[in-house]
Amino acid sequence: MTKKANIMAEKLNTIRAGVLGSNDGILTVVGVLFSVGAATTNQFTILLAGLADLLACALSMASGEYASVSSQADAQKVVVVDEKKRIKKQPDQVQQDIYQFYYDQGLTEVTAHKIARELMHKIPLETILKVKYDMTLGHYVSPWSAAFSSLICASLGGMLPLAAMYLAPLQWQFLATIGATIVAVALTGFLSAKLGQGLPKRAISRNIMIGLITIAIHYGIGMLF
């Protein structure tokens, strides 16, 4: 991957973490608001439960992203170490892998062999990482950017239903929260579809359905108490 492509991949990974964090923040907070709201009319209790869940969700998403992306970065570093050993112990096999890559791209055997020999002589490690793993030497995914993105977006996502419930008039607070949730999860569905090159309408519908089911389940749980 080129430097520009690496930067773009890093940005997309950060955005992905943010979208997932936002969606989780929305659903977990609205679930708590409706379960606690169905069980009690005490506004302070509902607010405290929502804020506690918001904090827990944001920290959980951030730590999860950090652990996940750190594991990915560690795996990339292991690949670099393994390929260094292969270059020393099995240089012919490494060169064959480079040749095979260029041959599969449509080059002739002679040209592919020539390129493989030259690259093996000049930049063997950089080349094998690129052709075999689509990696750039020294560039690893950043767990911190994913963690912070998830932390911030989960917090912002969770604030939407929380703000809707407490800014709306008392008699409309549940309907306002449902409306805010629908808008919020529709937006995260649209963004996730765009990032994954999926179908926006299907993703939006799916997210809205999940959001409504989440509300119904948690409201039902709250009614039991």
Image (cartoon, rainbow, N blue to C red):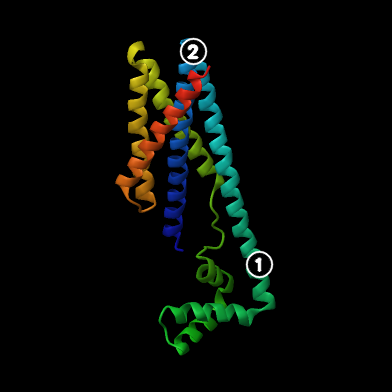
**Among all residues in the image, which is located at the extreme bottom?**
110
Q: Give coordinates of residue 217: x percent, y percent.
A: 46, 29
Q: What amino acid is found at the position of numbered circle 1 in the picture? A: Asp
Q: Give coordinates of residue 71: x percent, y percent.
A: 61, 51
The image's mark for residue 82 is 1
The image's mark for residue 204 is none
Residue lying at 49% horizontally and 82% vertically, measured from the top left: 115
Q: Give coordinates of residue 140: x percent, y percent.
A: 55, 55
Q: Are marks 2 and 1 in contact (CB under 8 Å)?
A: no
Say whether residue 186 is left or right of residue 154. left
The local crowd at label 2, few if under 14, some if 14 to 19, many if 20 or more residues have their Cα within 10 Å, is: some
Mark 2 and mark 1 lie on one chain; the one further toward the N terminus is: 2
Residues at marks 2 and 1, CA–CA distance in whole angstroms: 59 Å
Front-most of 101 and 206?
Answer: 206
In the rendered image, which quarter is residue 8 located in? bottom left
**Among all residues in the image, which is located at the extreme front?**
224
Residue 6's place in the image compared with 37, above or below, is below
- Helix, strand or loop at disc 2? loop
Residue lying at 48% horizontally and 9% vertically, measured from the top left: 42
Residue 27's place in the image compared with 165, above or below, is below
Front-most of 159 and 5?
Answer: 159
- Would you name the residue on which mark 2 appears? 40
- Helix, strand or loop at disc 1? helix
Residue lying at 57% horizontally and 41% vertically, measured from the top left: 64
Front-most of 43 and 128?
Answer: 43
The local crowd at label 1, few if under 14, some if 14 to 19, many if 20 or more residues have their Cα within 10 Å, is: few
Q: Give coordinates of residue 111: x percent, y percent.
A: 45, 86
Q: What amino acid is found at the position of numbered circle 2 in the picture? A: Thr
Residue 205's place in the image compared with 162, above or below, is below
**Among all residues in the image, which is located at the extreme top?**
42
